[in-house]
Amino acid sequence: MSLEKLRPLLIVEDDPALQKQIRWAFDQYETLTAGDRESALVQVRRHMPPVVTMDLGLPPDADSVSEGFKLLEQILSIAPQTKVIVLTGQNDRANALRAVGLGAYDFFAKPFEIEMLSLTIDRAYRLYDLQQENSRLQLMQQPDVMSGLITRDPEVLRVCRTVEKVAGSNATVLVLGESGTGKELIARGLHAASARRSERFVAINCAAIPDNLLESELFGYEKGAFTGAAKTTPGKIETANRGTLMLDEIGDLPHNLQAKLLRFLQERVIERIGGRQEIPIDVRIVCATHQDLKILIQEGRFREDLYYRLAEIVVSIPPLRARQGDVALLAHAFVRKFATEQNRGAMTLREDALRAIESHAWPGNVRELENCIKRAVIMAEGGQITVEDIGLNQVQSDHDSSLDLRQVREEAEKRVIIMALARADGNIVKASEMLGVSRPTLYDLMHRFGLK
């Protein structure tokens, strides 16, 4: 006797006799039943059935199709991949076609042949499985243009997808994120995935250069434009012509230069300091800041019209503390990197060190973690890095506030699996031992959550 769990099939039918007939005919599935719209929605939310058969005529007005169409739209809103097979009256082809137009998988006129309905249900399950597998494969693919970014976090992976989508355009991109989150890495990824990849990537930090020098750094100057200008010198914007220019910490750009940058973005020409000739420039602009530009606008420190020129596409990078499993994953990678650089041989993180790393808030984000691991690799006496080498104290993490039991359970499972894989540095045997499950079970769970 097979112990395999039966797949759920939801039957929405208010006729008890027909409901019983369908349940009896499809006992190879876990048949769930509902007699009205509300109970059907409860079953959908609870079980997320891949396939649903439903009658359009449902209480309180079984002679009307309004309840059926409301239910169809709500099912496809809650579970867009679910295949809904609509059962209609013999002379109700118009509503059947309307249901398919709204997203139903197929329709059958009553009375129907069980064998034909069975074939359609089987095909619906096959299509559902193919689409789920395709989605998992897409999630598991490592983004080529962001190969330098190490992550398993869904939000950061979405950032990578955004980078891939907008890289081919000339849209100006604004990258937001706390200090140390990897804003320049995103900017370089945009450049590497664009048609400008063979040209120069030029970066300038607007906060690191004194105000009186920043204009000449950006726009360049002609010979004799000011004392010490011994020769004509192109600025960063001109140097990046046909390539990509990253303006880091754009929130610190002086107000007078904001107006000049806005004119360049509108006209795409520059004039060097002391020059009269307009020089056309073709460059992709990527800006980055850790500040809230909208607050700076309210305070009168940043031009609103410049903001909307820069924010054609906005990419927000989550802080390290909000990235599921990435802290341990990055820690292992940095240990390997710095152990090689320092000629320390093979080094590993001890369990107490990993716990301390995972519980720390990392206000300095990836940059702080990188510096911490580098110091620990240098200071560690043996091949294992201890909590003393890391120099961090453990704190308790926040509890999940969601009350949706199914969602909380799935998120908790996924989070624990990600943490186990990160702690085990991708070793499936070690991770399955930590989780107390077999390797095939762990592989199944990884496929279920789209983890590689």
Image: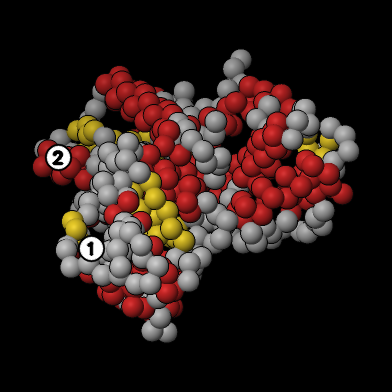
Height in image: 92 above or below 266?
A: above
Q: Position of residue 17 (x, y in %)?
A: 36, 36
Q: Are marks 2 and 1 in contact (CB under 8 Å)?
A: no
Q: Is residue 4 left or right of residue 66?
A: right
User: Badge 1 local density, few (<14 within 10 Å), some, or many (20+)?
Assistant: many
Q: CA distance from mark 2 to mark 1?
A: 60 Å
Name the secondary structure under disc 1. Answer: strand
Quadrant of residue 398 within the rendered picture: bottom right
Q: Is residue 403 left or right of residue 212?
A: right
Tell me what residue is drawn at x 66 percent, y 47 percent: 370
Residue 226 at least partly seen? yes
Q: Earlier in the sequence, mark 2 or mark 1?
A: 2
Which residue lies under the disc numbered 2? 97
Out of 221 and 64, give the one closest to the viewer.
221
- Amino acid type, mark 1: Ile
Tell me what residue is drawn at x 47 percent, y 51 percent: 184
Which residue lies under the disc numbered 1? 270
Height in image: 387 above or below 225?
A: above
- Which dot, 2 or 1, sits closer to the camera? 1
- Residue at far bottom of view: 299
Q: Position of residue 260 (x, y in %)?
A: 28, 71
Out of 178 and 400, give the one closest to the viewer.
178
Out of 203 and 90, give the one closest to the viewer.
203
- Amino acid type, mark 2: Leu
Residue 434 at least partly seen? no
Tell me what residue is drawn at x 88 percent, y 38 percent: 381
Disc number for residue 432: none
Q: Position of residue 230 (x, y in %)?
A: 36, 62
User: Badge 2 local density, few (<14 within 10 Å), some, or many (20+)?
Assistant: some
